[in-house]
Image (cartoon, rainbow, N blue to C red):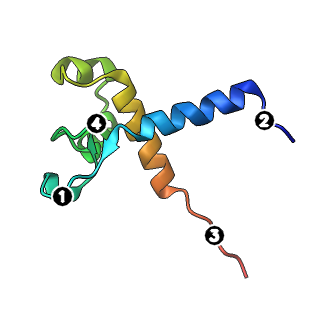
Amino acid sequence: RSKSAVEVVVMVDRAALLKRITQTPGKCGRRPCIRDMRIRVVDILETLAEGITTNEILEDFPDLEAADIQACLLYAAMRIDFPRLVA
């Protein structure tokens, strides 16, 4: 089955989003950060979990972009999605 144009665009967007997540030796204990800044993915996820809105986060962190928050969510989703083997 060939992929529709929409499916291809989604795959490209995912790849572009994931490029925003970086892990650099010597920076934040090599934990995943956003675009080599010292803003960790976990910090953004915890902030969202506390009920802080995306707009409030963007106001508090002027160097962030909405796509950075989206990248954090995608990264987290991919980290917890693992196959289960059932016997």
Crowd band around label 2 with a 10 angstrom C-alpha radius: few (<14), some (14–19), many (20+)? few
Displayed quadrant of residue 29: bottom left
In the picture, measured across the screen, residue 76 lies left or right of residue 35, that is right
Crowd band around label 4 with a 10 angstrom C-alpha radius: few (<14), some (14–19), many (20+)? few
Displayed quadrant of residue 10: top right
Q: Which marked residue is nearer to the observer: mark 2 or mark 3?
A: 2
Q: Which marked residue is nearer to the observer: mark 1 or mark 4?
A: 1
Q: Which marked residue is nearer to the observer: mark 3 or mark 1?
A: 1
Q: Which residue is mark 1?
A: 25
Q: Which residue is mark 2?
A: 3
Give the distance between the C-alpha atoms of the residues marked 1 and 4, in whole angstroms.
29 Å
Q: Which marked residue is nearer to the observer: mark 4 or mark 2?
A: 2
Give the distance between the C-alpha atoms of the residues marked 2 and 1, in whole angstroms.
38 Å
In the rendered view of the protein, which quadrant contains the N terminus? top right
Give the distance between the C-alpha atoms of the residues marked 3 and 1, in whole angstroms.
32 Å
Q: Picture coordinates of residue 81 (x, y %)?
A: 54, 56
In the rendered view of the protein, which quadrant contains the C terminus? bottom right
Q: Nearer the viewer, residue 64 or 76?
A: 64
Q: Secondary structure at mark 1?
A: loop
Q: Which residue is mark 4?
A: 50
Q: Which residue is mark 3?
A: 84
Q: Secondary structure at mark 4?
A: loop
